[in-house]
Amino acid sequence: MPITVLVPDDHGMSVLAELPGVRPVRFEVGEPLPPGAGQADVLIPGFQAGARAITYLPQLPNLKLVQLLSAGAESWIGKVPDGIMLANCRGAHGGSTAEWVMAALLTIYREMREFAAAQADRRWDLHKTDTLQGKRVLTIGAGDLGNQLKRRLEAFDAHVTMVGTTAREGVHGVAELPQLLGDHDAVVLMVPVTPKTVGMVDAEFLSQMADGAVLVNAARGSVVVTDDLLAELRSGRLRAALDVTDPEPLPSDHPLWTAPGLLLTPHVAGTCAGNFERAYAVAASQIAMFAAGEKPANLVRGEY
């Protein structure tokens, strides 16, 4: 008997229709569930409005799996009833996010914004810039995102130090951060949101970074204490690149907009061509495992 999967978009419908033993059913987030949807075994929330799909859970008594299209699962952790599995989309967006980090670091070191301003003013501003080559980059987060970034950084002859929750071969533990921060030119955040990571980048953390270092946040805004980062940016001691902020979206009158030494983008690291295709490729593989009686490989356990 096929499993029923609630799917929030037409692209997902076409992908899942190819899976044996799977019956996709289209629904619109925020609208009443269609007839027969109450018997669904799997729910796929949408990309942007996915968290709103939590309200459907009481209407789905047979639900066994929530398959996210995002790598982040913080909106769902603790909100899925016992007996329902939660799987993220690890492996879909690591490359895109790593690419954004590379673009941010290259923009800062090679002064692309300054050259763009000179172009707008029709000034031939020939001068020497910094380089990513030889930079020491501390990557906090040693999962798919961190490893995708490591591969790209090393191709640019940067030196990468990886940090994970616990130490293992080739990876330092978070307990070692106080000894590591001051020895690196850039610190990249690629961690999930958990009670331990919310606010981890505070005034003490930032004070341990080297003068002139760059903080790059490709995780979530809540990982960084905004006021503490603003103080360092205003002093000119540190620079930063943020794809995520706290609060988010950023209000038009927020001081981050005019903070010196800051490159800011509106949570677009994973938002690029092919993101739907990559997300559904991972989601389809997880659902195929479930349909075959196996547990999906991307199950979220505990805090993450």
Image: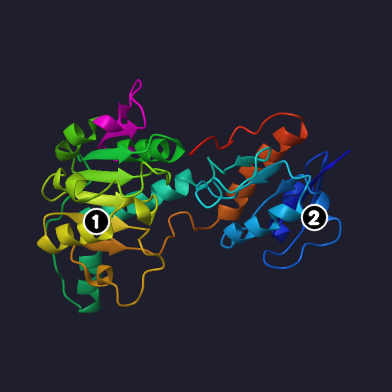
> Residue 80: image x %, image y %?
62, 46
Judging by the rendered image, the residue that carries numbered circle 1 is: 240
Q: Name the mark on residue 85.
A: none
Q: Is residue 212 left or right of residue 80?
A: left
**Badge 1 amino acid:** Ala
> Residue 161: image x %, image y %?
27, 33
For image coordinates 11% across by 55% down, the residue present is: 237
Query: Is residue 173 rendered magenta in the image?
Result: yes
Q: Is residue 216 left or right of residue 98?
A: left
Which of 170/45 is in front? 45
Q: How many marks?
A: 2
Q: How is the image coloured?
A: rainbow
Q: Name the mark on residue 25.
A: 2
Establish if 164 lies above or below 114: above
Is residue 110 something one can see in this rendering? Answer: no
Establish if 292 lies above or below 100: above
Point out the residue furthest to the top here.
169
Q: Is residue 182 left or right of residue 304?
A: left
- Quarter occupied by residue 163: top left
For image coordinates 16% across by 71% down, the residue present is: 124
Magenta stretch, residue numbers? 155-175
Establish if 222 lies above or below 18: below
Disc 2 on helix, strand or loop?
strand
Comes first in the chain, label 2 or label 1: 2
Q: In 3D space, how far apart are the residues under numbered discs 2 and 1 (Cα atoms)?
A: 44 Å
